[in-house]
Image (cartoon, helix red, strand yellow):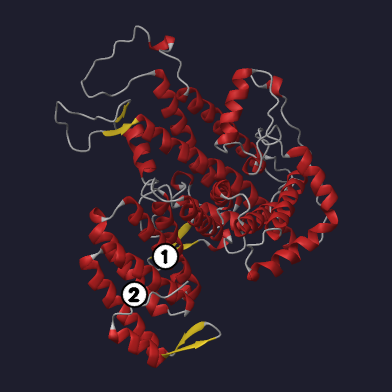
Amino acid sequence: MHIIIIFDNIYIIRLLLSSINITNGEIIMNKESEIEYFSYMENLIVKSRQENINEAIQILGTMIDEAINLLNVNGLKNAINIGETLLSENQKELSDYTYSILNYYLGVAYSEMITMDKGFKIKGLEKGIYHYRIALDSDEIDTQHKSSILVNLANSMSAVGRNFDSLRYINEALEYDSNHPIALGNKARILNSIADSIYDDGHKNLLYASIFDCYRKALSNKELPEYAKIPYSKIYNNLEPYAEDFNMLINENHSNELIIEENKNRQYRKWCLRHQLFLNPLNSIMDNNLSARDVFGLPSIVTKVGDGPYYHSMYNNIKQEYVSSRYLFYKGLNREGTHFSDKEVSIYNTLDYASQSYNNECVKAGFRIVYSLLDKIAYFINIYYEINLPYHKVNFRSIWSEKIKNKFQLRSNLRSDKNWAVNALIWLSKELHEKDIYTGDLSVFSRKVPTLRNYIEHKHLKILDMDIGSRYFTEPEGYAMTIARNDFIDNTMFLFKIVRDAIMYLSIAVNIEEYYRNTQRKEQIIPPMSITNIEDDWKR
């Protein structure tokens, strides 16, 4: 981080010389100097904005850097306000690259503000994620810039418990630089959180092997910052006694080979692996036979004597509907000409370019089914956590909060502060409905999803093979939603990834909660009840 010094300005030179001390190469200001400095920077941005908006944004970046360096809360708040004003009032003037840079600066400012002002935490996390996502949505940013955004966004997602999303962003950053030491360290930290919280020992061991490998690579990189060397080394040294076992696991299982004989099955599973759609945490770190299976289920749950395994039955249903809707989505994407069921079906040409086909209905059916699983997850949570909402009022929007003294507050029995997977589900729910009294927005893109669902279920959705839209006739306002097929597919893929993560978060949340409940129980005998898997041949 650095300060831009404008040497042709007599005032700033006098300010720097009279008020700023340089000690061991660091610039030190007293409080009075800080106030003058940030006031000057604000004025400089206002002046530059009139002449060169790009220069104003660069000065804003410097202001944010220095506010963070100096832990100056007011300076950072003012920088955020200025940045939001620049964004709202100059958006049309900004190039795609500059727009991305400005959003990146705001993402950094909101993220850092959390550490300075605890009351800013929720808003800071929401706005940080929002601006990082907008910054990432640019074709003009260079790979170094994109990598920085991805690492920061991954950190923000991890901070709210959304570790599977975080891994996607970290893995993408590592595609640009496979030895990025901080990205490797962050990946190891996220994997460690998942490994400590899942019930399957085989998965745990493979995740720990990947953690060991990440720290080994990071520590061998000469560009690893000094502040990271000691904590990284400490964890690595704790894992090193198991190095031989970890290396064996890595060599045996980190292969990209997918050994499946049937070609159609292999292509489908490759597609699921590529988009990380398997209910399997290993799908986030490897692409092979081990990760190409939907093996993630529920852990053991202690219930009352006489109760059957009804939680596992609910989870079975959620899981089966997910994998079936995933295949419907895949089938609709990979259309091979006109389907026989569409032949000799009389469809009017309404001159609006709306596509009508079995393939589109497969994608829409996949969307419908997978969206409905979120309410079924809420139904599970309502019973498991004994929230006791009337069943007809249970949905993925209502389950997290209750109204106390005219204010919505998170339900205390969910223990989200002690259970990162519950927190992940809460934050994931912010993606899937528009603004209301107790949630913010994480992405403009994600807000299309609930609107799409509303039009699919209750109104009229027109999917266009070409992004042309109605050109010949007027239509009643709000009567239909029109969307290009590629855009609809992108939104559907976004939804599938969210629901895949939610299903796994549910299992992890239960595993963490069961551990917590076991620590609270008095010593007693708990007889086990064994259940086996349904054989594939029984599935008719």
- Residue 491, compared with residue 188, is above or below; it is above
Expressed as whole percent of the image width and height from the top left, the position of residue 420 reads: 60, 58
**Circle 2 is placed at which residue position?**
78
Sequence-wise, which precedes: disc 1 or disc 2?
2
Helix or strand or loop: what does disc 2 sit on?
A: helix
Q: Is residue 369 left or right of residue 454?
A: right
- Residue furthest to the front in view is 8
Helix or strand or loop: what does disc 1 sit on?
A: helix
Residue shown at the point (48%, 28%) measured from the top left: 329
Residue shown at the point (70%, 52%) measured from the top left: 195
Along the line of sight, the residue nearer the viewer: 238 or 46? 46
Residue 39: quarter of image: bottom left
Q: Is residue 317 left or right of residue 354?
A: right
Q: Is residue 254 left or right of residue 69?
A: right
Q: Between marks 1 and 2, how big is the CA–CA gap?
A: 16 Å
- Residue 97, compared with residue 485, is above or below; it is below
**Circle 1 is placed at which residue position?**
123
Along the line of sight, the residue nearer the viewer: 199 or 163? 163
Residue shown at the point (47%, 66%) measured from the top left: 111
Which of the two discs, 1 and 2, sits closer to the camera? 2
Circle 1: residue type: Lys
Circle 2: residue type: Asn
Q: Is residue 435 visible?
A: no
